[in-house]
Amino acid sequence: MLHTGADTREPPRASSSAELTAIKGLVFGTHRRLWVGVVTILVPLIVLLVLQYRWLGDLERDSAIARRASLEASLTGLTKEVHYYYLAAAERLLNLPAEILRERQFDKAELLLANRDFAGVENLFLVTFDEQPRLLYYDPERRTLTEPDATPSSHAIRLAIAPWTPLADDGTEIDDSRIVADEQDPAHRIVYSPVADEARRLVGLVGFTIDQTYFVDQVLPDAISVSLPMFDDEEALWVCVRDQRGNLMFPEQGCSPSDTDHVTRFFSFVFTDWTVSLHGKLATPEHWARNNFAVNVTLSTALAVVLLGGIVFTVRTAIREMRLSAMKNEFVSNVSHELRTPLASIRVFAELMRRGRVSDPAKVEEYGTHIEIESRRLSQLINNILDFSRIESGEKVYSFEPSDIEDVLERTLATFTVRLRDRHIALDYGGTDEPLPRLYLDVNAMDRAIANLLDNAVKYSTEDDTITVRLDRVDDEVVLTVADRGIGIPPDEQERVFDRFHRVGTNLVHDVKGSGLGLSLVRHIVRAHGGHVTLDSEIGVGSTFAIHLPVGWRPDDVEGGEPCRES
């Protein structure tokens, strides 16, 4: 060891530790404030989501009620359409003067009925009351009135008019403005209107039997299209009509059993024993409300997830930026220390030499060597910082030329001789027995890469350790390895040690200073030479870094020594 009247050891590190402690305290305090802000955002968001969920639940119940009311109103509108159709038909067909029936002017009746529309009518009939009620059918094709044969239809008509005979015999006053529907015989439904004279006495009846087939094929579809235009998607919702026995009358197929219908109505004028219902999934108000509820909850959840994703992204970005800021702060602190240490040594040795306290030429040479070594150390640190800045900005330029990698390695090792001797660290260097091929290298950049690996090995080695350096050819690669017997690197950090500003997070290296750029620059430089860097490390055993350079590699866009810009 070198001993002089001045202390040439590194300055005390208490101030650096205090700086790092202050930096960590600032970062952790910022983290806490950041999480407080996140919680401040999340709590109202969660409360809002809970309240919205409850509100959507209430809306689901209200929507089911409103939906049921809407569907029931739609069915009511459908039954009214049927009602209006047959009222209009009655008003169109059954309007005959009383004197025609009273005086039995059937020829005039035939003329009046000739141009009327009989759509939906099975049989139009007239009834006159004299000594004996007389029933006549009107034939639209022949335009004549004739007495019908004894048929189920005529029997149903006679059954319907029977209660009116006593009223005609007694001369009871009646209201001839009403239209009556008689459904005593479901197979022959009758719509008729009483006809009265000036004294409001009954003189006859005019009516028709309903064509059930026409009702199913024409009247119902038209009424559905008018009253339920929004429900024309048959795969979602359609109308089912069943007769008094529950038989499906409309449509021919596609309806489930009647006990699955949820909204049902009876017709109000004719076919009053038939039911009309809405069938299909959307016909269930509760199902419709649940669908709306699910859609609203899904949208709310999706928006919440997007918002949470934005918050998480923002938090992660903020944490990353804070970590980067902390690493940069630590980098500034470490670089400051790295600059102070060699400068202090240079200042001490230079001051001793300036004051003439050293007269022995050997000592002068030794001190000069120390000054040169520390100057090289400063130059290496400054070059690392400058190279890192150029790489980050994409302005780093490499100048490649055919070179001997062994010569580059030996020159670099020579600069570390004094530093290794002062630290009592041995160097075990061995090259290959066979000459290595010349490689395209940026000599200065490769020198810095090797120097950074050696500097890293020296920092994490202790006295009496040995650093092993090997240079070999393995298949199509030239492999340069630097192995130390230091503390080793944890497996979960072996990939991250090549990241900028990253330093191994263990108490065992708390007092080891550095810029955190060395290994990152090694990787950049080696990649620029078409190679790669590997690491093999074990805790308590040591670490081995290896530079792999491909034999025969040439820069892609250069010839000879032209510069190559790293992207």
Image (cartoon, rainbow, N blue to C red):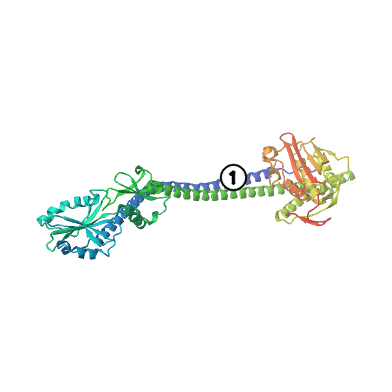
Identify whether 65 is placed above or below 465. Answer: below
Q: Is residue 109 left or right of residue 75?
A: left
Q: Is residue 523 left or right of residue 119?
A: right
72 and 69: which is toward the camera: 72
Q: How many marks?
A: 1
Residue type pointed to by label 1 = Phe
In percent of the image, x 50 and y 47: which residue is there? Answer: 42
Identify whether 96 is placed above or below 340. Answer: below
User: Is any part of residue 416 visible from this angle?
Assistant: yes
416 and 479: which is toward the camera: 479
Residue 134: x %, y % from top left: 17, 56
- Identify the image quadrant of the N terminus: top right
**Residue identifier under label 1:** 28
Q: Secondary structure at mark 1?
A: helix
Looking at this rendering, what residue extends furthest in the left direction? 170
Identify the image quadrant of residue 510: top right
Residue 345: x %, y % from top left: 78, 46
- Identify the image quadrant of the C terminus: bottom right
144 and 388: which is toward the camera: 144
